[in-house]
Amino acid sequence: MKRWRIAGINFDHFHMGDLLRQTHEHPAAEIVGISDEFPERMENAARTFGLGAERVFTDYSACLEATKPDIVILCPAASRHGEWVEKVAPYGAHILMEKPFAGSLAEADAMMAAMRPTGKVLSVNWPLVWDAGQQTAHRLIQEGVIGEVVEFHHHGGNRGPLCHGADKQDKEPTAEEKAASWFYSAAQGGGSLLDYMGYGATLGTWHLGGKAPLEVTCTWNVPQGIEVDEHSVAVLRYTCGLSKTETRWGTFTDPWTHQPQPMCGFVLRGTQGTISCYDYARHIRVQTRARPEGFEVPVDVIPSPNRNPIEHLIHHLETGAPLIGPLTLEISRIGQQIVDTAFQSAKQKRTLPLVG
């Protein structure tokens, strides 16, 4: 059995810790190196996964040259996804990019172009994909339980991006930490819209079977004293009707501990029924023509290789099995089109046709 050599590069996003843990736990994978320009950001990972000094680098190129990984996990700030793909692509590794796809559609297209000559896979990890409710809802859609999906309503967010670290450990950020974080920097792609709307746009596109909207209308709230939005609402007009995606930093509670109100998750309407699937719930609720009163469906027990992105990507590379929808560039690119259009709509305060 091949042993997959995996390196983690750039720790801007705390999800790097989750992805390294999934690598550490995979029986056919090993962490061969980690790299970040700030050594202190790697200390916890090095300690947790027993990485000696020979596997810890502050120079990404030295890391790639010394470790020769098969797969590189990238977790840079949203505005630097293109830069980092262009840096890493020449080393000939597959790349798993932590969400979002990119800081802009132009950047996403440049990332795809940079990877094309290598023949390697570029995939985008959307952590909500691995929630059992999302996969259960999509299975029911594929089985035709609610007919053709024509509408989705998404509400996504949490108390704030600095209120938790790897593996959802609670934190209380200081004003200084906020000021120093890329999450709160407009120049670096911060804000709740760019942080979270990709979930609704990308998973909504997946559930809609790859449909793209005609136009987008978005508004946001940028609180006094910070550069970026903490709340946004976008309405998407399709040939089949309207859908909505809403993002929020500052929910009353985090959905993985106690669902806030309004709850985080999706409501999907089809031609023959509806499904509500809220984040981390043990059941989803279904209505059909035959049972309009509705009924609960326990979420599926998700088997390997669909429990996390590391095992899923390795399975794809070993077998050629298709990637789950949101990890594909086709679905993620439509999500990026929606996010880009929503961002410009909020800035210009008007409805805009879908970009790109």
Image (cartoon, helix red, strand yellow):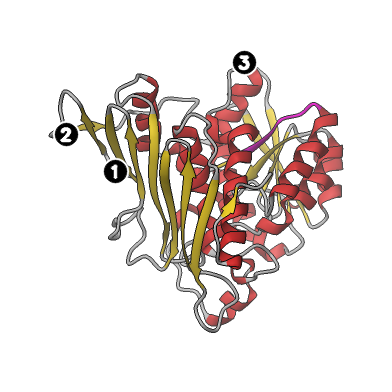
Give amino acid for label 2.
Gly
> In the displayed structure, does residue 63 sit left or right of residue 328?
right
Callout 1 environment at 10 Å: few (<14), some (14 to 19), or many (20+)? some
Q: Where does the C terminus fall, quadrant-wise?
A: top right
Q: Quadrant of residue 253?
A: bottom left
Residue wearing tag 3:
319
Residue under pointer 2: 294
Query: Under tag 2, what secondary structure?
Result: loop
Q: Which residue is mark 1?
A: 281
Q: Where does residue 79 sit, x and y in percent of width and height? A: 70, 58
Q: CA distance from mark 3 to mark 2?
A: 39 Å
Asked whether, in this view, residue 147 is left or right of residue 324, the answer is left
Q: Please, what is the three-letter code of the amino acid marked with disc 1?
A: Ala
What residue is at 33 percent from the left and 31 percent from the top?
A: 270
Residues at marks 2 and 1, CA–CA distance in whole angstroms: 17 Å
Mark 1 and mark 3 lie on one chain; the one further toward the N terminus is 1
Find residue 224 and report its horizontal and vertical position in percent: 52, 83
Foreground: disc 3 or disc 2: 2
Q: Residue at x 35, y 32 (%)?
A: 137
What amino acid type should be assigned to the residue bearing mark 3?
Thr
- Judging depth in this view, the residue of 317 and 356 nearest the camera is 356
- What element does badge 1 sit on? loop
Residue 205's x, y, as percent? 50, 37
Magenta segment boundaries in residue numbering: 119-124
